Image: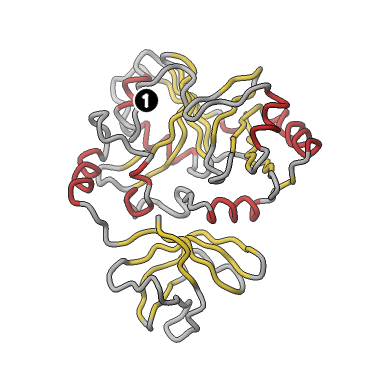
Amino acid sequence: MLTNANLYSPSAILSIRGPDANSFLQGQFTNDLSRPNGSSTYGLWLNQKGKIVADSFVLRCAADDFLVFSHFSPTPVICARLHACLVADEVTVEDVTADWQAVNLWGPRAAEFARKIYSATPLSGCFNRVDEALIFPGRSSRQENFTIMLPAAQATELQRQFLTLGAASANANTAATERISSGLPAVPADLGPGDLPNEGGLDEFAISFTKGCYLGQEVMARLKNLGQVRRRLHVVEGPGAAPPHGCEIFQNGQRVGEFRSAARRGDGFVAFAMLSLLNLNPAAGLSRGSDGPADIRLVSVL
């Protein structure tokens, strides 16, 4: 099994600073940010109905100095969400996305390769700063994996160093295949403004149920008490070309859901599918059309 390095441009990196930065972010983010400097916390930005607006890591650089990092959620979406809730808070939100690039490193030797360049790797929930680079455990794989963000001018050289150590250069499809196979949904491609965190299993690790109020918190508390949702994100696989986003899925001639993101894998594809749980038979195959072959298999449910 290879260790892979994927060089890419993150969708959003924001600098959040000011005397009220901590209290402001704590009142907006789904996860608990009352953690020490050097912490890295994954969570969500919700709307008042509890639907997902964006996701991100929040890196606490100092008491009132944070970086918001998102692999896929666009900068304008996160900025609009934050500015809509800024009233009298002494907080500045600066878009610094263009200044940075990132390398996702995953696989059985990821920590070894990272240590050869940065001497040490961060613990779970933390980040290390080495010169101008920041490294933290990411969401590119269920295997050992790290995200390294660094000034754009240095990113290509870091990628070259990892390849020299023996890593394979991963393209966008390879990275998507690993992410989907690992059951790590992207926001907004797999879970977005029409979806609840619970429908993709994000309530398990992206939401704090003890931190107190934040936008969407009442809906999350109610869902926790009620239990099941009526649909869930699944990992599926099938033969042939990867289906387009939004393509309908059928079982026994009835529409049961739709594809979200998909990637080529071998002679077929692996994909996320949002499926209704009503009358779904997990043991039966799925099809792309109402009368198509049932050649798509359920792999797991999030």
Is residue 146 placed above or below 192 in the rendered structure? above
Identify which residue is drawn at 35% across, 21% down: 34
- Where does the image place residue 23, in percent across and percent down from the top left? 31, 20
Of residues 94 and 236, the one nearer the viewer is: 236
- Sort mark 1 into few (<14), some (14-19) or many (20+) by Cα contacts within 10 Å: many
Total labels drawn: 1
- Where does the image place residue 144, in percent across and percent down from the top left? 58, 39
Residue 36 is left or right of residue 165, and the answer is: left
Identify which residue is drawn at 47% across, 29% down: 125
Of residues 113 and 179, the one nearer the viewer is: 113
Judging by the rendered image, the residue that carries numbered circle 1 is 33
Residue 198 is left or right of residue 67, and the answer is: left
Identify which residue is drawn at 22% across, 52% down: 227
- Where does the image place residue 3, in percent across and percent down from the top left? 69, 44
- Where does the image place residue 204, in percent across and percent down from the top left? 35, 43
Of residues 7 and 94, the one nearer the viewer is: 7
To which quarter of the image does residue 150 belong?
top right
Identify which residue is drawn at 64% across, 43% down: 107
Is residue 173 placed above or below 145 in the rendered structure? below
Residue 54 is left or right of residue 136, and the answer is: left
Three-letter code, disc 1: Leu
* Quadrant showing the C terminus: bottom left
Of residues 120 and 58, the one nearer the viewer is: 120
